[in-house]
Structures are given as structure tokens and as C-alpha cells.
Image (cartoon, rainbow, N blue to C red):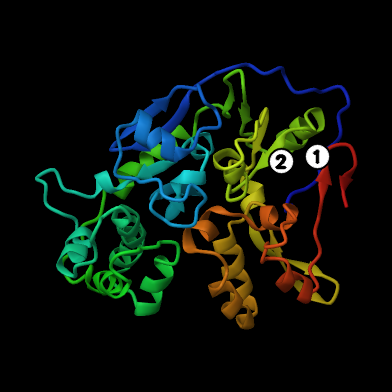
Amino acid sequence: MVDSPSPTPDPGRHPPPAPGALRPIRLWIGGTARALAPAGTSRTLLQVLREDLGRPGTKEGCAEGDCGACTVAVGALRGEALEVRSVNACIQCAAALDGCAVFTVEDLRAPDATLHPVQRAMLDHHGSQCGFCTPGFVMSLWTLYLQHAAAGTRPSRTEVEEALSGNLCRCTGYRPIVEAGLAMLADPPRLPDLETVRAALRALDGDAPLDLDDGTTRFVAPRSLEALLELRAAHPEATVLAGSTDVGLWITKQFRPLPMLLHLGRIESLREIGVVRAEGGACLRLGAGVSLTDAWAAMVARWPECDTLWRRFGSTPVRNAGTIGGNVANGSPIGDTMPMPIALGAQGVLAARARGER
């Protein structure tokens, strides 16, 4: 699943010892860059938002990525493009979002207290009762709103329903919320200054690779496959962290100690999608760090019959965060990625520092 050449083994090189907090976790949030203290290296984004950053609008419901009350939008650079997608804050390690922008429901209201069109549509269509789940619904719709407002289009009912696939509501039913999603672009669009966000993330991207050690958990985010393989060879006991849709539950539900986390999210080569020549013709190649959203989109584009399974796979925030390599490598009996690649005759490419690729 790794789309990158093998590193040249160098037995004389070893990873440096844990350097402690060389620099803080950096996020762009609320219009500014924020530095987070290294204490609690494995803390979730939800904990940081509510306890450290004074953003209680994001709620904790299930703490396992099912209910969507904690949904936020995360912006990340993909080359020069800014990609904004919804994720579950309750199972995302805050450190894994180093160098990203985070948008919460507090960011939507204008300085003069005018509601955002998404919020106004929810109000006008009676899409909220107790209100506990409402911020998550609003952020899922806001992410969809950005996509269509930038393109000058309006979402279909199917698109609204898919955007809300990770949000549960016990009060209203879903009809008024879906109607709010269909109506949210009726007025002139109101978009954040995405160019400012893009420039801010480019500035943050120049920071050194994140390597934190709070005395309980060391969190390392290498920037290359070579550095990852070197760290993995030196620390075979480390937990490999990709989208956190499984490992996040080890933290929130099992309270499992995780002495070391190796994060794959900053390795660009693992997020590549391409077509390579193979025996029998062209072959689709997916890096192990490609999100489930992008991996399935690539498969559907090539094999349209995959579309039905894709739409039944998890929820939009889970697909946005989870990776195809993680879904395969974790070996979960509910890992829904495997049947389709097996049916398509897929092969996996494994890389190790000492042995190269196989």
C-alpha cells in the first residue's frame, strides 16, 4: 500500500533519542495561530477545544465517532490547495492536526452577531430542539456549504444526506435538517478568507517535524517515508497512527497506555494516487495514507460499480479521517475496505528499512 521507493538501508544511522518538546503543537483557529502545551500528547482535539481553547460549542456525545455531536471542519494543505473536510473531534489526537486549521461552530457567527446562512437555515426550518447535536449538524452542513458556495452551485438532496451521514439527532427527525441544508445557499454566500488561512498554513508548514514527549506518550510525525521506516525499525513497539478512527477509541474507551505514536499524516508520498503500468495494463495505485474518501472516489471513477458500497461505508467524517492503509492493516472484522480490492485482484506493497519492499 506504500507508494514510495524503498530507502537505502544504512545500519550506521539511528533515530535520535526523544528530544522532549522541541516545539509546541501549532493550529490555526479563530483567525490566529495557537500554540498548544505538550502536556497530554495523546489528548483528543475535543478535549483541547473545550478545556484549553474555550470552545464549548463542540459537544461530546459518544466519544467514539458515531453520533457527530463533536463534528468540526479541518483545513489542510494538499500541495497549494486548501482542503476543508468534516471530522470527529472526539477521536482525533490534537497533535495529529499540527499545522492544520480547525473551524468550530464559534467561527460561523459574524462579528456583528449575524448568524451564518447555515445557522439561519437551521433556525428557519426548525432543525433544532434540545440543541445538543446542533453544532455538529451545522459544521457538517457548513463544510458542504463551502464546497458549493465556492463553485456557485447548490447541493442536491443526496449530497445533503451524505454530508449528514455521521450526525445523529434524537429530537427533530431529519426532515427539517435536510430542508435546512437544501435552503442554506438561497442567500448570497458568506465564505471565510480562505486565502489568509492558506497563507497561514504555509507558514506553519515550515516548522520542524513534530516530536513531543510529555513523559507518558511520545508523538512523532516524520515528514518522509525514510524517516518513518527508520523510526519504526528503532521502535517496533510504537503504535502507528493514521486517521485515528480506530486508535482514537483505544484512547477514549479503553484508556490504553500508548507510550509512542508514529503519525503518518505528514508524509506526502503516502497520500499519492496514481496510475502505473503493470502486467495486463494500467493499475491504480493508492498510497497507504490516502483517505477513505479519496481512495473510494478513485475506485469509483475507475470502477463505477463500487459506488453503492462506497455510499454504505461508514460516515462522511469517518471516511474523511480514516485511511485505506489503516483500514486494511488494522485487520478489523468490520474493515469494509477489504472485499472490493480483493475482488479486483489488488496487491499490497510493504516497505521495511532493512528488507526494502515486497
Residue 203 point in image, percent of width and height: 42, 33
Give the structural element (helix, strand or loop) at label 2: helix
Identify the image quadrant of residue 121: bottom left
Residue 178 seen: yes
In this view, the mark in front (1 or 2):
2
From where the camera sits, is residue 344 visible? Answer: no
Q: Which mark is residue 225?
A: 2
Task: Give, as a three-letter code, the residue at label 2.
Answer: Leu
Q: Relative to the observer, which residue lies in front, 229 or 263?
A: 263
Q: Residue at x 44, y 33 (%)?
A: 204
Q: Earlier in the sequence, mark 1 or mark 2?
A: 1
| Residue 116 x %, y % | 19, 56
Instruction: Identify which residue is drawn at 30% across, 65% down.
Output: 171
Which of the labelled discs sits on residue 7, or is there none?
A: 1
Q: Nearer the viewer, residue 3 or 25?
A: 25
- Which residue type does callout 1 highlight? Pro
